[in-house]
Image: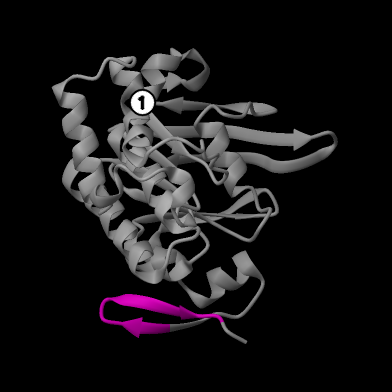
Amino acid sequence: MIEIRDISKKYRETFVLRHVSTRLPSDRMVAFIGSNGAGKSTMLNIISRLLEPTEGSVSIDGRELRKWDSRELAKTLTILGQTLHTPARLTVEELVRFGRFPHSRGRLENQDFLQIEKALELTEISDLRHCYLDELSGGQRQMAYIAMAIAQDTKYIFLDEPLNNLDMHRAARIMKLLRSLVREQGKTICIVIHDINFVSFYADYVVAFRDGILCHQGPTEDIIRTDVLRDIYGMDIAIEPYGDKKICVYYE
């Protein structure tokens, strides 16, 4: 379990997060939602130890984040950020191999190769394994980085807007894949995402931010409501039933 206690973060005199406390449920897909600048990515970076909070603390599995050994932490959580740097002469397979570094320290064994192959197959990019990253489309590169994150095979997976540059088919495929990792392998996935229809269909739990505060949290069905979404986004969003799910219509 991830426990967040009274987290605040400020740059100079401006707070981007204010006194956020929550517990993120394990073995679930947790969606961080909210408008641009609400604090979603900042919180994800804090709980992955990429960013130091101004105040407060984070614990993972009962241990304070600052007390984790870096190598042990890399075997426990994966973080895939928004900004992905592309080494020009690196192939897809070479990139995915980097996901095994916390386990192998560069000396790949049979188990590592199995995880690499599995990640390539799950993301449906096996046919691109020998392609150089700078030869791919933005969406194909995004899939390669997602494959690298999957190859790391950690208990916690943190993804910051992973659907960027993906077409509808690939975006839906990735969300289904992430849900299967939760259901079948017991992963805990925290995802920053703007498409609230994907949230409605695939997320188990939602944490919503507005102006640096945690304004709503709970099971997805409790958040995908007109009044709650209005408070989060400041606009009226119509909600229509679709089977046992809900579709949000936010075009004006």
Q: At x 40% / y 15%, what residue is drawn?
A: 71
Label 1, on which residue? 61
| Circle 1 crowding by C-alpha within 10 Å: few under 14, some 14–19, many from 20 | few
Is residue 174 highlighted in magenta? no
Determine whether, in the image, residue 98 is placed left or right of residue 251.
Answer: left
Farthest right residue?
A: 13
Q: Secondary structure at mark 1?
A: loop
* Residue 19, x across and y down, in percent: 65, 38
Q: Main secondary structure of the magenta part?
A: strand
Amino acid type, residue under disc 1 in the picture = Asp
- Quarter of the figure with residue 139: bottom left
* Residue 197, x across and y down, in percent: 42, 71
Q: At x 31% / y 40%, what residue is drawn?
A: 150
Q: At x 70% / y 54%, what residue is drawn?
A: 211
The residue lying toward the viewer, choosing from 40 and 8, is 40
Above or below, 34 against 228 in this view is: above
Q: Which residues are magenta?
A: 240-250
* Residue 249, x across and y down, in percent: 50, 82
Q: Quadrant of the C terminus?
A: bottom right
